Image (cartoon, rainbow, N blue to C red):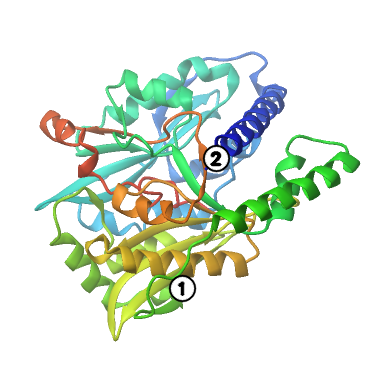
Amino acid sequence: MALIDQNFLDVILKKIRVRRRTISNDSTPPDILATRPAAKLREARFTDFEAVSKLKSRWGLFPDSLENWERLWRRNPALEFIRFEPPIGWVLEAEGCVVGYLGNIAQLYHYGNSTLTAVAASGFVVEPAYRGASLSLVAAFYRQSSPDLFLNTTAIKSVGMIAKAFKADPLPQSDYDTVLFWILQPYPAAQAVLRELDLPAPLLHVGAALGSMVVGADKFLKRRWPQARSTQFTIREISASEIAKDFEDLWSAKLREPSRLLGNRSASALQWHFRIPGDRGSTRILCCYSKRELLGYSVVRNDPGKENSLRRSVIADIVARRDDSDILGALFVAAHDLAKSAGSHSLEILGFPHSVRQVCAAWNPYLRKYPACPFYYKAADPGLHKKLSDPGEWYASPFDGDTTLMP
Protein backbone atom coordinates (compact mmCIF):
# COMPACT_ATOMS: atom_id res chain seq x y z
CA MET A 1 0.00 0.00 0.00
CA ALA A 2 1.22 3.48 -0.73
CA LEU A 3 2.39 5.46 2.30
CA ILE A 4 -0.25 8.15 1.82
CA ASP A 5 -2.98 5.48 1.96
CA GLN A 6 -1.67 4.07 5.23
CA ASN A 7 -1.25 7.50 6.84
CA PHE A 8 -4.81 8.44 5.88
CA LEU A 9 -6.20 5.24 7.40
CA ASP A 10 -4.12 5.68 10.57
CA VAL A 11 -5.43 9.23 11.09
CA ILE A 12 -9.07 8.21 10.59
CA LEU A 13 -8.77 5.19 12.90
CA LYS A 14 -7.05 7.25 15.59
CA LYS A 15 -9.84 9.84 15.55
CA ILE A 16 -12.52 7.13 15.75
CA ARG A 17 -10.80 5.43 18.70
CA VAL A 18 -10.44 8.71 20.59
CA ARG A 19 -14.11 9.52 20.03
CA ARG A 20 -15.21 6.06 21.21
CA ARG A 21 -13.11 6.36 24.39
CA THR A 22 -14.63 9.78 25.10
CA ILE A 23 -18.18 8.41 24.74
CA SER A 24 -17.33 5.43 26.95
CA ASN A 25 -15.82 7.66 29.65
CA ASP A 26 -18.99 9.74 29.75
CA SER A 27 -21.01 6.72 30.91
CA THR A 28 -22.30 6.88 34.47
CA PRO A 29 -22.27 3.86 36.80
CA PRO A 30 -25.64 2.71 38.14
CA ASP A 31 -26.93 4.05 41.46
CA ILE A 32 -26.18 0.80 43.25
CA LEU A 33 -22.48 1.74 43.20
CA ALA A 34 -22.92 5.02 45.08
CA THR A 35 -21.84 3.55 48.43
CA ARG A 36 -19.21 1.23 46.92
CA PRO A 37 -19.55 -1.77 49.25
CA ALA A 38 -16.63 -4.21 49.23
CA ALA A 39 -16.61 -6.79 46.41
CA LYS A 40 -15.90 -10.47 46.94
CA LEU A 41 -14.60 -12.94 44.38
CA ARG A 42 -16.35 -16.26 43.77
CA GLU A 43 -16.79 -18.78 40.97
CA ALA A 44 -19.56 -17.95 38.53
CA ARG A 45 -22.75 -20.01 38.53
CA PHE A 46 -25.39 -20.56 35.86
CA THR A 47 -27.78 -18.55 38.00
CA ASP A 48 -25.54 -15.51 37.41
CA PHE A 49 -26.59 -15.39 33.76
CA GLU A 50 -29.06 -12.50 34.04
CA ALA A 51 -26.77 -10.36 36.22
CA VAL A 52 -23.78 -10.91 33.93
CA SER A 53 -25.88 -10.13 30.86
CA LYS A 54 -27.01 -6.82 32.38
CA LEU A 55 -23.44 -5.97 33.38
CA LYS A 56 -22.22 -6.57 29.83
CA SER A 57 -25.03 -4.46 28.38
CA ARG A 58 -24.22 -1.55 30.70
CA TRP A 59 -20.65 -1.40 29.46
CA GLY A 60 -21.04 -1.91 25.75
CA LEU A 61 -20.55 -5.67 25.41
CA PHE A 62 -23.15 -7.63 23.50
CA PRO A 63 -25.28 -9.50 26.07
CA ASP A 64 -25.16 -13.26 25.77
CA SER A 65 -28.14 -15.63 25.61
CA LEU A 66 -28.95 -18.41 28.05
CA GLU A 67 -28.85 -20.85 25.12
CA ASN A 68 -25.28 -19.79 24.37
CA TRP A 69 -24.28 -20.29 28.01
CA GLU A 70 -25.67 -23.81 27.69
CA ARG A 71 -23.60 -24.32 24.55
CA LEU A 72 -20.37 -22.95 25.99
CA TRP A 73 -20.39 -24.71 29.34
CA ARG A 74 -22.68 -27.72 29.08
CA ARG A 75 -22.52 -28.80 25.42
CA ASN A 76 -18.85 -28.06 24.79
CA PRO A 77 -17.35 -31.22 23.19
CA ALA A 78 -13.99 -30.48 24.84
CA LEU A 79 -15.55 -31.35 28.22
CA GLU A 80 -15.87 -34.98 27.11
CA PHE A 81 -12.08 -35.33 26.85
CA ILE A 82 -10.70 -33.37 29.78
CA ARG A 83 -10.37 -34.94 33.22
CA PHE A 84 -11.28 -31.90 35.28
CA GLU A 85 -14.31 -29.65 35.46
CA PRO A 86 -13.19 -26.07 34.83
CA PRO A 87 -15.17 -23.19 36.36
CA ILE A 88 -17.44 -21.38 33.94
CA GLY A 89 -15.78 -18.20 35.16
CA TRP A 90 -15.64 -15.87 38.15
CA VAL A 91 -17.62 -12.88 39.37
CA LEU A 92 -17.03 -9.99 41.70
CA GLU A 93 -20.08 -9.59 43.94
CA ALA A 94 -20.94 -6.60 46.16
CA GLU A 95 -23.99 -6.91 48.43
CA GLY A 96 -25.64 -9.37 46.08
CA CYS A 97 -24.86 -7.39 42.91
CA VAL A 98 -22.49 -8.71 40.23
CA VAL A 99 -20.00 -5.91 39.52
CA GLY A 100 -17.33 -7.88 37.62
CA TYR A 101 -17.07 -10.97 35.45
CA LEU A 102 -14.55 -13.09 33.57
CA GLY A 103 -15.61 -16.20 31.61
CA ASN A 104 -13.52 -19.37 31.26
CA ILE A 105 -14.02 -21.55 28.16
CA ALA A 106 -12.42 -25.01 27.88
CA GLN A 107 -10.85 -26.01 24.55
CA LEU A 108 -8.66 -28.76 23.11
CA TYR A 109 -5.40 -28.17 21.25
CA HIS A 110 -3.01 -30.46 19.42
CA TYR A 111 0.76 -30.09 19.34
CA GLY A 112 2.75 -32.86 17.75
CA ASN A 113 1.56 -36.09 19.33
CA SER A 114 0.15 -34.32 22.40
CA THR A 115 -3.41 -33.27 23.12
CA LEU A 116 -3.46 -30.18 25.35
CA THR A 117 -6.24 -28.74 27.47
CA ALA A 118 -6.65 -25.00 27.12
CA VAL A 119 -8.82 -22.36 28.74
CA ALA A 120 -9.78 -19.09 27.05
CA ALA A 121 -10.63 -15.92 28.94
CA SER A 122 -13.88 -14.35 27.75
CA GLY A 123 -16.19 -11.41 28.40
CA PHE A 124 -13.97 -9.52 30.87
CA VAL A 125 -15.98 -6.60 32.30
CA VAL A 126 -15.89 -4.72 35.61
CA GLU A 127 -17.87 -1.73 36.87
CA PRO A 128 -15.57 1.36 36.98
CA ALA A 129 -15.85 1.71 40.75
CA TYR A 130 -14.48 -1.81 41.18
CA ARG A 131 -11.77 -1.92 38.54
CA GLY A 132 -9.16 -1.81 41.28
CA ALA A 133 -10.34 -5.32 42.18
CA SER A 134 -10.28 -6.62 38.60
CA LEU A 135 -6.86 -8.22 39.15
CA SER A 136 -8.52 -10.81 41.38
CA LEU A 137 -10.56 -12.05 38.40
CA VAL A 138 -7.45 -12.40 36.24
CA ALA A 139 -5.55 -14.03 39.10
CA ALA A 140 -8.30 -16.64 39.46
CA PHE A 141 -8.02 -17.41 35.73
CA TYR A 142 -4.25 -17.94 35.84
CA ARG A 143 -4.35 -19.79 39.18
CA GLN A 144 -6.08 -22.79 37.61
CA SER A 145 -3.85 -25.80 38.14
CA SER A 146 -5.16 -28.27 35.54
CA PRO A 147 -5.03 -26.56 32.08
CA ASP A 148 -1.94 -26.86 29.89
CA LEU A 149 -2.53 -23.58 28.09
CA PHE A 150 -4.06 -20.19 28.95
CA LEU A 151 -5.33 -17.96 26.11
CA ASN A 152 -6.67 -14.45 25.84
CA THR A 153 -7.33 -13.61 22.20
CA THR A 154 -9.43 -10.43 22.51
CA ALA A 155 -7.25 -8.38 24.87
CA ILE A 156 -7.22 -4.59 24.75
CA LYS A 157 -3.98 -2.81 25.71
CA SER A 158 -4.76 -2.57 29.45
CA VAL A 159 -5.77 -6.24 29.62
CA GLY A 160 -2.57 -7.19 27.82
CA MET A 161 -0.56 -5.36 30.48
CA ILE A 162 -2.37 -7.32 33.20
CA ALA A 163 -1.72 -10.58 31.33
CA LYS A 164 2.00 -9.79 31.24
CA ALA A 165 1.95 -9.38 35.02
CA PHE A 166 0.88 -13.03 35.22
CA LYS A 167 3.75 -14.08 32.91
CA ALA A 168 1.64 -14.40 29.78
CA ASP A 169 3.32 -13.32 26.56
CA PRO A 170 1.97 -11.72 23.38
CA LEU A 171 1.73 -14.04 20.42
CA PRO A 172 5.22 -14.13 18.82
CA GLN A 173 3.78 -13.54 15.33
CA SER A 174 4.81 -9.92 14.75
CA ASP A 175 2.05 -9.09 12.26
CA TYR A 176 -0.88 -10.61 14.16
CA ASP A 177 -2.03 -7.10 15.09
CA THR A 178 -2.20 -6.12 11.39
CA VAL A 179 -5.50 -6.79 9.65
CA LEU A 180 -5.53 -7.36 5.89
CA PHE A 181 -8.74 -6.22 4.21
CA TRP A 182 -10.38 -5.49 0.91
CA ILE A 183 -13.07 -2.84 0.43
CA LEU A 184 -16.06 -4.35 -1.32
CA GLN A 185 -18.38 -1.33 -1.59
CA PRO A 186 -16.43 1.96 -1.57
CA TYR A 187 -19.31 4.46 -1.17
CA PRO A 188 -21.24 2.84 1.71
CA ALA A 189 -17.92 1.90 3.37
CA ALA A 190 -16.76 5.54 3.22
CA GLN A 191 -20.14 6.70 4.57
CA ALA A 192 -19.97 4.28 7.50
CA VAL A 193 -16.42 5.29 8.44
CA LEU A 194 -17.13 9.02 8.23
CA ARG A 195 -20.30 8.64 10.35
CA GLU A 196 -18.02 7.50 13.18
CA LEU A 197 -16.51 11.02 13.11
CA ASP A 198 -19.99 12.55 13.61
CA LEU A 199 -19.66 14.87 10.62
CA PRO A 200 -22.54 17.16 9.54
CA ALA A 201 -24.71 15.64 6.81
CA PRO A 202 -23.44 17.86 3.94
CA LEU A 203 -19.80 17.09 4.77
CA LEU A 204 -20.64 13.42 5.21
CA HIS A 205 -22.09 13.08 1.69
CA VAL A 206 -19.31 15.07 0.04
CA GLY A 207 -16.62 13.20 1.96
CA ALA A 208 -18.15 9.81 1.18
CA ALA A 209 -18.41 10.66 -2.53
CA LEU A 210 -14.79 11.83 -2.72
CA GLY A 211 -13.57 8.90 -0.62
CA SER A 212 -15.37 6.34 -2.74
CA MET A 213 -13.94 7.84 -5.95
CA VAL A 214 -10.40 7.65 -4.56
CA VAL A 215 -10.85 4.10 -3.25
CA GLY A 216 -12.55 2.93 -6.45
CA ALA A 217 -9.73 4.28 -8.62
CA ASP A 218 -7.11 2.85 -6.28
CA LYS A 219 -8.78 -0.58 -6.35
CA PHE A 220 -8.84 -0.60 -10.13
CA LEU A 221 -5.29 0.63 -10.65
CA LYS A 222 -3.72 -1.67 -8.06
CA ARG A 223 -6.11 -4.58 -8.63
CA ARG A 224 -6.99 -4.85 -4.96
CA TRP A 225 -9.15 -7.97 -4.96
CA PRO A 226 -8.53 -11.75 -4.92
CA GLN A 227 -8.26 -13.23 -8.39
CA ALA A 228 -8.66 -16.85 -9.39
CA ARG A 229 -5.45 -18.77 -9.96
CA SER A 230 -6.80 -22.17 -10.96
CA THR A 231 -9.97 -23.71 -12.35
CA GLN A 232 -9.19 -27.22 -11.15
CA PHE A 233 -11.23 -26.92 -7.94
CA THR A 234 -14.93 -26.99 -7.14
CA ILE A 235 -16.21 -24.72 -4.38
CA ARG A 236 -19.31 -25.72 -2.43
CA GLU A 237 -21.04 -23.48 0.15
CA ILE A 238 -22.59 -25.11 3.25
CA SER A 239 -23.79 -24.22 6.74
CA ALA A 240 -22.10 -25.39 9.95
CA SER A 241 -24.84 -27.99 10.47
CA GLU A 242 -23.80 -29.65 7.18
CA ILE A 243 -20.21 -30.35 8.26
CA ALA A 244 -19.66 -34.07 7.62
CA LYS A 245 -17.11 -36.88 7.63
CA ASP A 246 -14.91 -35.35 4.91
CA PHE A 247 -13.96 -32.62 7.42
CA GLU A 248 -12.78 -35.38 9.77
CA ASP A 249 -10.57 -36.77 7.00
CA LEU A 250 -9.09 -33.33 6.30
CA TRP A 251 -8.44 -32.78 10.02
CA SER A 252 -6.63 -36.13 10.28
CA ALA A 253 -4.45 -35.16 7.32
CA LYS A 254 -3.58 -31.79 8.92
CA LEU A 255 -2.46 -33.54 12.11
CA ARG A 256 0.03 -35.58 10.05
CA GLU A 257 1.66 -32.44 8.66
CA PRO A 258 4.66 -30.76 10.37
CA SER A 259 3.90 -29.99 14.00
CA ARG A 260 2.17 -26.71 14.92
CA LEU A 261 -0.14 -25.77 17.75
CA LEU A 262 -3.64 -26.29 16.35
CA GLY A 263 -7.03 -25.77 17.95
CA ASN A 264 -9.16 -28.91 17.61
CA ARG A 265 -10.89 -28.82 14.22
CA SER A 266 -12.67 -32.15 14.28
CA ALA A 267 -16.10 -32.18 12.65
CA SER A 268 -17.90 -32.06 16.01
CA ALA A 269 -15.68 -29.22 17.28
CA LEU A 270 -16.30 -27.16 14.12
CA GLN A 271 -20.05 -27.65 14.35
CA TRP A 272 -20.05 -26.61 18.01
CA HIS A 273 -17.81 -23.62 17.36
CA PHE A 274 -19.80 -22.09 14.51
CA ARG A 275 -23.39 -22.91 15.46
CA ILE A 276 -24.05 -19.99 17.79
CA PRO A 277 -27.55 -19.59 19.31
CA GLY A 278 -28.97 -16.12 18.79
CA ASP A 279 -26.24 -15.14 16.33
CA ARG A 280 -27.03 -11.77 14.76
CA GLY A 281 -24.79 -12.43 11.78
CA SER A 282 -24.42 -15.34 9.42
CA THR A 283 -21.68 -17.94 9.10
CA ARG A 284 -21.06 -19.83 5.87
CA ILE A 285 -18.45 -22.46 5.07
CA LEU A 286 -16.79 -22.68 1.67
CA CYS A 287 -15.44 -26.14 0.82
CA CYS A 288 -12.76 -26.68 -1.80
CA TYR A 289 -12.90 -30.04 -3.62
CA SER A 290 -10.87 -31.81 -6.22
CA LYS A 291 -13.27 -34.42 -7.55
CA ARG A 292 -14.78 -35.73 -4.28
CA GLU A 293 -11.84 -35.01 -1.98
CA LEU A 294 -12.09 -32.09 0.45
CA LEU A 295 -8.79 -30.20 0.18
CA GLY A 296 -9.61 -27.20 2.32
CA TYR A 297 -12.29 -24.90 3.65
CA SER A 298 -12.80 -21.31 4.75
CA VAL A 299 -15.33 -20.03 7.27
CA VAL A 300 -16.79 -16.62 6.46
CA ARG A 301 -18.61 -14.72 9.16
CA ASN A 302 -20.83 -11.89 7.92
CA ASP A 303 -21.44 -9.42 10.74
CA PRO A 304 -24.61 -7.35 10.40
CA GLY A 305 -23.19 -4.26 12.09
CA LYS A 306 -25.33 -1.56 13.65
CA GLU A 307 -27.61 0.58 11.51
CA ASN A 308 -25.59 2.85 9.18
CA SER A 309 -22.32 1.37 10.45
CA LEU A 310 -19.59 -0.56 8.66
CA ARG A 311 -20.68 -4.09 7.76
CA ARG A 312 -17.76 -6.50 7.78
CA SER A 313 -17.16 -10.04 6.70
CA VAL A 314 -14.31 -11.86 8.43
CA ILE A 315 -12.38 -15.01 7.57
CA ALA A 316 -13.04 -16.84 10.84
CA ASP A 317 -10.94 -19.85 9.81
CA ILE A 318 -9.20 -21.20 6.74
CA VAL A 319 -7.45 -24.56 6.36
CA ALA A 320 -5.84 -26.16 3.31
CA ARG A 321 -3.80 -29.31 2.91
CA ARG A 322 -0.11 -28.43 3.26
CA ASP A 323 -1.13 -24.74 3.17
CA ASP A 324 -1.28 -25.12 -0.61
CA SER A 325 -1.37 -21.65 -2.19
CA ASP A 326 -3.70 -22.66 -5.05
CA ILE A 327 -6.26 -24.11 -2.63
CA LEU A 328 -6.00 -21.06 -0.37
CA GLY A 329 -6.31 -18.77 -3.39
CA ALA A 330 -9.50 -20.46 -4.57
CA LEU A 331 -10.98 -20.16 -1.07
CA PHE A 332 -10.10 -16.45 -0.76
CA VAL A 333 -11.67 -15.70 -4.15
CA ALA A 334 -14.85 -17.53 -3.09
CA ALA A 335 -14.87 -15.73 0.28
CA HIS A 336 -14.56 -12.34 -1.46
CA ASP A 337 -17.52 -13.17 -3.72
CA LEU A 338 -19.59 -14.44 -0.79
CA ALA A 339 -18.92 -11.36 1.34
CA LYS A 340 -19.85 -9.06 -1.52
CA SER A 341 -23.10 -10.90 -2.19
CA ALA A 342 -23.92 -10.71 1.54
CA GLY A 343 -23.84 -6.90 1.32
CA SER A 344 -20.71 -6.44 3.43
CA HIS A 345 -18.57 -3.34 2.98
CA SER A 346 -15.25 -5.09 3.64
CA LEU A 347 -13.64 -8.53 3.95
CA GLU A 348 -11.00 -8.88 6.69
CA ILE A 349 -8.25 -11.38 7.48
CA LEU A 350 -6.74 -11.39 10.98
CA GLY A 351 -3.80 -13.60 11.87
CA PHE A 352 -2.86 -16.90 10.19
CA PRO A 353 0.75 -17.89 9.48
CA HIS A 354 2.99 -16.36 6.83
CA SER A 355 2.18 -19.12 4.30
CA VAL A 356 -1.48 -18.02 4.36
CA ARG A 357 -0.96 -14.26 4.60
CA GLN A 358 1.42 -14.16 1.64
CA VAL A 359 -1.35 -15.51 -0.59
CA CYS A 360 -3.44 -12.48 0.42
CA ALA A 361 -0.53 -10.08 0.05
CA ALA A 362 -0.29 -10.89 -3.66
CA TRP A 363 -3.67 -9.14 -4.13
CA ASN A 364 -2.67 -5.83 -2.51
CA PRO A 365 -5.03 -5.71 0.47
CA TYR A 366 -5.28 -2.59 2.62
CA LEU A 367 -3.78 -2.76 6.12
CA ARG A 368 -4.89 -1.54 9.52
CA LYS A 369 -3.32 -2.17 12.91
CA TYR A 370 -4.80 -2.83 16.31
CA PRO A 371 -3.60 -0.41 19.01
CA ALA A 372 -1.91 -3.43 20.66
CA CYS A 373 -1.55 -7.17 20.13
CA PRO A 374 -4.90 -8.78 21.11
CA PHE A 375 -3.51 -12.33 21.59
CA TYR A 376 -1.72 -13.48 24.78
CA TYR A 377 -0.75 -16.98 25.82
CA LYS A 378 0.79 -18.81 28.74
CA ALA A 379 1.75 -22.48 28.90
CA ALA A 380 1.75 -24.17 32.31
CA ASP A 381 4.92 -26.05 31.37
CA PRO A 382 7.87 -23.63 31.05
CA GLY A 383 9.45 -25.86 28.39
CA LEU A 384 6.33 -25.72 26.23
CA HIS A 385 6.03 -21.97 26.81
CA LYS A 386 9.57 -21.51 25.51
CA LYS A 387 8.85 -23.64 22.41
CA LEU A 388 5.81 -21.51 21.67
CA SER A 389 7.95 -18.37 21.61
CA ASP A 390 8.82 -19.46 18.04
CA PRO A 391 6.23 -17.96 15.63
CA GLY A 392 6.58 -21.00 13.38
CA GLU A 393 4.94 -23.17 16.06
CA TRP A 394 1.57 -21.41 15.74
CA TYR A 395 -1.45 -21.51 13.43
CA ALA A 396 -3.08 -18.57 15.19
CA SER A 397 -6.34 -17.14 13.85
CA PRO A 398 -9.80 -15.92 14.93
CA PHE A 399 -10.63 -19.60 15.51
CA ASP A 400 -8.56 -19.47 18.70
CA GLY A 401 -9.89 -18.45 22.08
CA ASP A 402 -13.27 -16.72 22.12
CA THR A 403 -12.78 -14.43 19.09
CA THR A 404 -15.44 -16.17 16.96
CA LEU A 405 -17.34 -18.05 19.67
CA MET A 406 -19.74 -15.26 20.58
CA PRO A 407 -22.84 -13.95 18.74
Of 82 and 400, the residue lying toward us:
400
Q: Can residue 382 be seen here?
A: yes
Res 357 label: none
Q: Is residue 197 left or right of residue 143?
A: right
Residue labelled with disc 2 = 2
Can you say whether 343 is above or below 358 in the image? below
The front one of 4 and 140 is 4
Q: Position of residue 332 (x, y in %)?
A: 44, 64
Q: Tag 1: residue type? A: Ser
* Marker disc for residue 239: 1
Up-down: is 393 above or below 277?
A: above
Whether residue 271 can be seen here:
no
154 above or below 68?
above
**Residue 380 relative to residue 142: left or right:** left
Helix, strand or loop status at disc 1: loop
Residue 162 in percent (x, y) is at 39, 21
Question: In which image quadrant can residue 52 be found?
Answer: top right
What kind of residue is marked 2? Ala
| Disc 1: CA contacts within 10 A as few (<14), some (14-19) or many (>=20) | some
Q: Provide residue 152's location: percent of width, then percent of height.
A: 37, 36
Q: Residue at x 45, y 76 (%)?
A: 238
Could you give the CA–CA distance between mark 2 and mark 1, rounded to whole angstroms?
38 Å
Q: Quadrant of residue 201?
A: top right
Residue lying at the far right of the rendered structure: 202
